[in-house]
Amino acid sequence: MPNDFVKRPFLISLLTLCCLLAGALGTPDVVELGQRLKHAEKEERRLAAYQLQQMGESAAPAVRQLAKALSDDDDQVWLRATMTLAKIGPKAQHAIPPLVDQMGGNGARYAETRSRQSAYALSKIGEAAVPALLTALQDENEHRRWGAVHALGLIGEPAYSSLDAILKLLADVDQIVFEETVETCVAFGEIAVDQAADQLSAESDQVRIGAATILRRLSGHAHSQRDQVLAALIHEEVPAVRGSLVLAAVAFDIDAEFLAPIVTQALLGEEIEQDAAFLAVLTSSEISSEMVSKLALLLSDRDQARRERAANLLGRLGASASPAAAALVARLQAGSLESSEEKRYLNALILIGSNVVPQVIAATATASPESISGSHWTVRALQGLAPIALPELEAQLQTASPSVACALLRALPHYSRRNRAVEKPVRAWLRSETEALRAGAVNMLGRLSLPSKVWIAAQTNALKDPSPEVRIAAITTLENVPVSNKMRLTHLTNALEDDERVVRKCAAGALGDLGSLAKEALPVLLASVQGPSPTAGYRNTVIETFGKIGNDAESAVPYLRTLLHDEMDEATCLQSLRALAAIGVKAERSIPEILVLCEHQAIDLRRGALEALGSVSDQAEQKIPVFLKALDDSSPDVRRPVIAGLGRLRGEAAPAAGRLVDLLNSEEDREAALDALREIRPEDLDLCLRLLKSENVGRRLLACDRLGRMKDRRALPELRAARDDDEHRYVRRRAREAISRIESAKK
């Protein structure tokens, strides 16, 4: 044991000596590394710069070589040399001129990065760099000016003497230089306050804005400038400057009651002043509370623009603007508002939040139930409030007057929460004398998850209701109720014979939502449109339903064919084409009429006919000639679906591959044509070789894929050229894979 204690210090010393010797032998000399910075090989220069950077301040003997390396063309060498000089610090004074030069970016790709890194290195050199930086403040290059200001700000106290020169750059034409000047003055702190305050009377608007910004951010050190800022604010006429001064005044804690009228005026000024004033309001809760009453008074201003702006600002204040809710509601109740103004008031109420619900409900109660339509302002307000005030609205439903109930039922179209307290009044409203209440109750009952027998009884009565509005409500809620599809189909089929046209149209649309299940109603649907003078709207709804039924609507094809002629209106013709496309190959008897419309003068009809042909015909030889002709169409809206149709034919459309390749030169068709070619997978060697020489990467990738799958050895020379020379690595890789696939195939 004693021997171990004696041996241990000796072993540690020996190990330390070995490490030092190994380091001395394995690490190149600083001067030698500096010489390597001139090496012809880029990698050698990079390695030398890296090793010098790791040495830090110990690399000082290589300062001159590092300074010269700043002009190296390689970004990595330049960056490591710059960072090494920063680590060396004050001993790197010899590098000041080239660093100042590099601050200008010298046209490099990353000019801003060069400016920032060079400025940082100069700041680490410190006070010795100040004279050169002062000169650079007047340079023509904006990056060099920015870097000089930034570096002086980082140097700090030793650069305080440069403040006068720095403040002159508040007038700089370059925004980034102006902003960095403000940052540097703020970094200087209290010493910059007096001179910044003197600039509040400068002729330049930009200088005054900069001065106000500096004082705002240094307000903790600028109490003596408070009156100077206030005087400037009172006399300032330029909106942008006034906005900056408003923010400064708030930072100085000037009395909110005094500031409120000034801020109000700014809020109604130009946009740039508004933004600053609103930021001031958000910054100070005292000013915010003072503002609400003044903005509420502006809602009665004669100028509509001022009223709208006041409403917009109240909304942006959120819940703190609750005292103004009564004024907003009063304006909406008065009516006779432009739609834009009404929208502003509604948005303000919604943004203020759930606090406004009592005022809106009280206003709703004064209206007649008949006047509460879906577009009534109370309904729109309650719709907007529903996501944030649902519990309050639920409570109102339980004790609502007829008018309020009508508004709430319309405002909550998606309400599906199970709430027995709500169910009771809703079921009572089913027996109301007010049509709107009965219709709203039917709508809501369909979403309350009631027992089937309760809803079925309500639904049956609603479908027999004397009011069309109630019958329509019963039809539209059928999809939400727990009844069988057979019962839905029966109800909707019966509704097709309703006396009211709007009810029949609603039923026809609802049948379409059942899809193929509605095929049993086809005879009634066909009879309803083949009867005396159906309206265009009803006819198009029924045609759309045929399309939703799909290939089970084959019996509607003869009728749809009668609609495909020039005398029919374009909307009906187009809807018929869509229905035939949905029916598919069972509508092949309509091909003659469709082919005629493929050449119609109306773009939408040509497109619709070509899309229908693609679905109705299952014969590629019948479609391809028509599609090829359509590729010459003047409208890209027609060509694109044709190109997609050819792609869906896959290999059968191989004869069209050449035309699709030609379309790759068209900017409008390029993507669609390339997608189609990927689907078709052409086997034409010459065609694929053409694609391989294309300028477009996607085409070259497609060519490599196809040539590899074709395994034609004649493609090897071009593929090898692509493997070796293509500028895109993915193309080179795909070419390599294609070559491997071809060479591995049996000869």
Image (tube, helix red, strand yellow):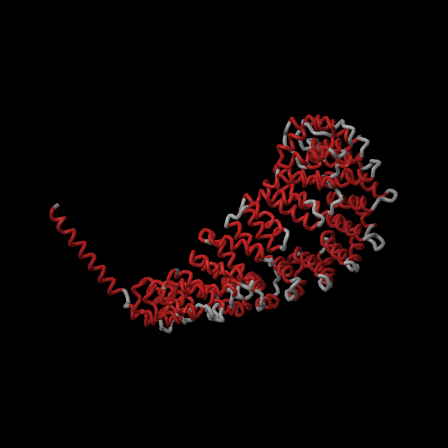
Vertical order, 440 against 58 (above or below): above
Q: Disc count in the image?
A: 0
Q: What residue is rendered at 29% in x and 70% in y?
A: 31
Q: Of all residues shown, which one is farthest toward the left?
A: 2
> Which of the pair 26/76 is nearer the observer?
76
Nearest the viewer among 40 and 322 is 322
642 sits left or right of 108 in the view: right
The extreme right residue here reads: 532
User: In the picture provided, is 68 more to the left or to the right than 676?
Assistant: left
User: Where is residue 732 shown, x and y percent of the image?
Assistant: 50, 64
| Occupied quadrant, residue 465 | top right
Q: Is residue 688 left or right of residue 220?
A: right
Quarter the N terminus occupies: top left
Q: Is residue 343 above or below residue 636?
A: above
Query: Measured from the top left, where is residue 99 in percent x and y?
Result: 40, 69
Q: Is residue 242 visible?
A: yes
Q: Is residue 490 visible?
A: no
280 vs 166: above or below:
above
Q: In which quadrant of the rendered view does residue 159 lie? A: bottom left
Q: Which one is nearer the viewer's eye here, 645 or 308? A: 308
Residue 523 image point, x, y percent: 81, 39
x, y percentage for residue 129?
38, 67
